[in-house]
Image (cartoon, rainbow, N blue to C red):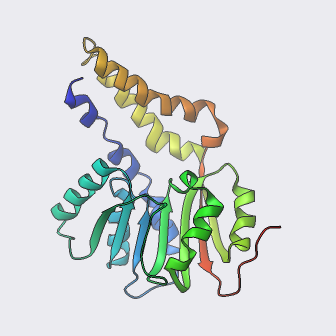
């Protein structure tokens, strides 16, 4: 497969269109001076770098994808942010920082890997007293997740939905258009066409699976009372 086709699908450009919702969620938090932020499942850092701009302070992005982390590190260097932003190659199952070190934990499109409730419980100790946890997740299971928030020791202070129309207009339709636009260029390259077919699968999942129709931001504050455990 020609290397070029893998670089021509610029998902970062499409994902950046949805940063308006990252900004909306951040603005729902109280004003924090010099917040220390952990971005879990950061990928190539589209959200990580936006959080650095919004907070004007320190952000650590963690992800298990080596290529994504390397791309983020290049972005950090190019933006002159090495003093404030750090990219760490790490599984979300193996995050190791001191207890209570972060004012905010942020994760977008990643917590389903570990499970909503498991993420709330596993990373709670990393958050400072009365700190914040912001999760952007699939819309499926939204009501069950609301119950887990309270059971795991958080208060839901705000919630909003990113509609399926927004995802289609700003992400999936441009992605599909790019895929189709590249097919003539690689019509004689079977491997490249197979790569484009694989990229199209995600678009089809969005079209056909209601679980992908929209997403939800949950903005939470850590409680200091004892966690309730499900019986």
Vertical comparison of 84 with 160: above or below: below
**In the figure, is residue 85 to the left or right of 168?**
left
For the point 65% across and 42% down, the residue is: 211
Residue 84 occupies which quadrant of the picture? bottom left
Q: Position of residue 231 (x, y in %)?
A: 83, 67
Which residue, as the protein is rendered here, is positioned at the far top?
188
In what quadrant of the picture does the N terminus appear? top left
Q: Is residue 183 visible?
A: no
Q: Position of residue 227 (x, y in %)?
A: 71, 79
Which residue, as the protein is rendered here, is positioned at the far right?
231
Vertical comparison of 209 with 163: above or below: above
- How many numbered dots are placed on residues in this image? 0
Residue 73 occupies which quadrant of the picture? bottom left
**In the figure, is residue 144 to the left or right of 192?**
right
Nearest the camera: 216 or 201?
201
Q: Position of residue 207 (x, y in %)?
A: 58, 31
Nearest the camera: 55 or 173?
55
Nearest the camera: 173 or 103?
103
Nearest the camera: 204 or 96?
96
Vertical comparison of 86 with 91: above or below: below
Q: Is residue 42 visible?
A: yes
For the point 25% across and 11% down, the residue is: 188
For the point 74% across and 58% down, the residue is: 144
Q: Position of residue 215 (x, y in %)?
A: 59, 51
For the point 50% across and 66% down, the residue is: 24
């Amino acid at each position: 497969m020609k290397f070029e086709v893998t670089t021509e699908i610029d998902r970062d450009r499409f994902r950046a269109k949805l940063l308006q919702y990252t900004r909306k969620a951040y603005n729902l938090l109280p004003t924090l001076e010099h917040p220390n932020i952990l971005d879990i499942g950061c990928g190539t850092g589209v959200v990580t770098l936006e959080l650095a701009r919004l907070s004007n302070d320190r952000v650590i992005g963690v992800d298990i994808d080596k290529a994504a982390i390397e791309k983020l590190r290049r972005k950090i260097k190019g933006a002159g942010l090495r003093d404030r932003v750090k990219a760490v190659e790490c599984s979300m199952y193996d995050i190791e920082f001191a207890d209570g070190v972060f004012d905010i934990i942020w994760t977008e499109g990643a917590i389903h890997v570990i499970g909503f409730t498991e993420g709330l419980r596993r990373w709670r100790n990393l958050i400072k007293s009365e700190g914040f946890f912001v999760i952007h997740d699939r819309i499926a299971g939204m009501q069950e997740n609301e119950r887990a928030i309270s059971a795991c020791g958080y208060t839901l202070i705000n919630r909003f939905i990113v509609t399926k129309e927004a995802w289609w207009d700003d992400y999936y339709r441009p992605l599909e258009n790019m895929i189709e636009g590249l097919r003539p260029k690689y019509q004689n390259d079977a491997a490249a066409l197979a790569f484009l077919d694989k990229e199209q699968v995600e678009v089809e999942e969005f079209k056909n699976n209601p679980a992908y129709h929209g997403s939800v931001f949950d903005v939470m504050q850590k409680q200091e009372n004892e966690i309730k455990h499900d019986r």
